[in-house]
Image: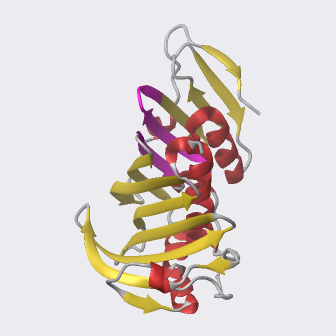
Amino acid sequence: MKTAPLTLSLALSLACAACSLRAAPAKPASTSELAAAGTAVSPAELSSVFKPSVAAYHDLQSLSLTTHLTCIQGATTKSTVSHFVLKRPRMVSAKLTIGPREWDFIANGSSAYSTAPNARTYTRARVMKPDDLANIWFRSGTGGTGVMPAMLFRKEGSNPEATGGPEGKRLPDIILDGVACDQFEWAVVEGRVRHHNTISIGKVDHLFRRLELVQTSPGEKSNITETYTDVKVNPALPASTFVFTPKPGARAVAAPR
């Protein structure tokens, strides 16, 4: 398996559950497969856990945070650090470090710019609606940055209802980046692939602080952890935050399609 599909897997299993709570995979795993500690929660209770988070992400107008993503596959570990600023509806400023490579990504409301790792070129693409940001983001080579961009670029304010999704467990509370968090876990099986998910959510602001996925299939196992630090809701952001300045000598190229 490759990193990009695993990250997409995380986005689907966590973002779908946490952002829009669309239909869960058809085969929830038994709670006997979850951690020994904790209290069992029903599908309805697990569904209701995410409703305040849906509202919190829907209502925020700006957000800054740092994302730390680690993917472990066998003996290989890949890490990404993203310093991320969002101002709705269509403004983003991000600096990403993926292994030895670095990107700058700027969206100023009408256009999105991304530097190539060698800094000799940059891409430009029109941004007409928030969904365009997600598409441009992942096409620009930044898909290894986890689920948070996909969650933030789309302003989904659904009111999810439990419809037979997985059971789970409430784990002991935890402190992450100085924030008291609730913790929940659940597992689902899709074909021969098992996803074990753990999420930590701020008790007061209902924003995610850590997402974890252990994905196993015959002969393979991957661990993905996405942690959010320095989370600031509705910070004051100067206009210069979203100004893209290409490096001297860099040339514009067409954005990937």
Q: Quadrant of residue 251?
A: top right
Asked whether, in this view, residue 201 is left or right of residue 117, the answer is left
The quadrant of the image that shows the C terminus is top right
Assess whether residue 170 is covered by the magenta stretch.
no
Vertical order, 182 against 236 (above or below):
below
Asked whether, in this view, residue 148 is left or right of residue 83, the answer is right
Q: Which residue lies at the image location 45% right of the left edge and 54% below the top edge?
A: 224
Residue 145: % across, % down: 51, 45
Asked whether, in this view, residue 158 is left or right of residue 106, the answer is right
The secondary structure that dominates the magenta segment is strand
Viewer-proximal residue among 46 and 188: 188
Residue 132: % across, % down: 71, 46
Residue 51: % across, % down: 54, 81
Q: Which residue lies at the image location 54% right of the left edge and 35% below the top edge?
A: 106
Vertical order, 89 against 174 (above or below):
above
Assess whether residue 93 is covered by the magenta stretch.
yes
Q: Which residues are magenta?
A: 76-102
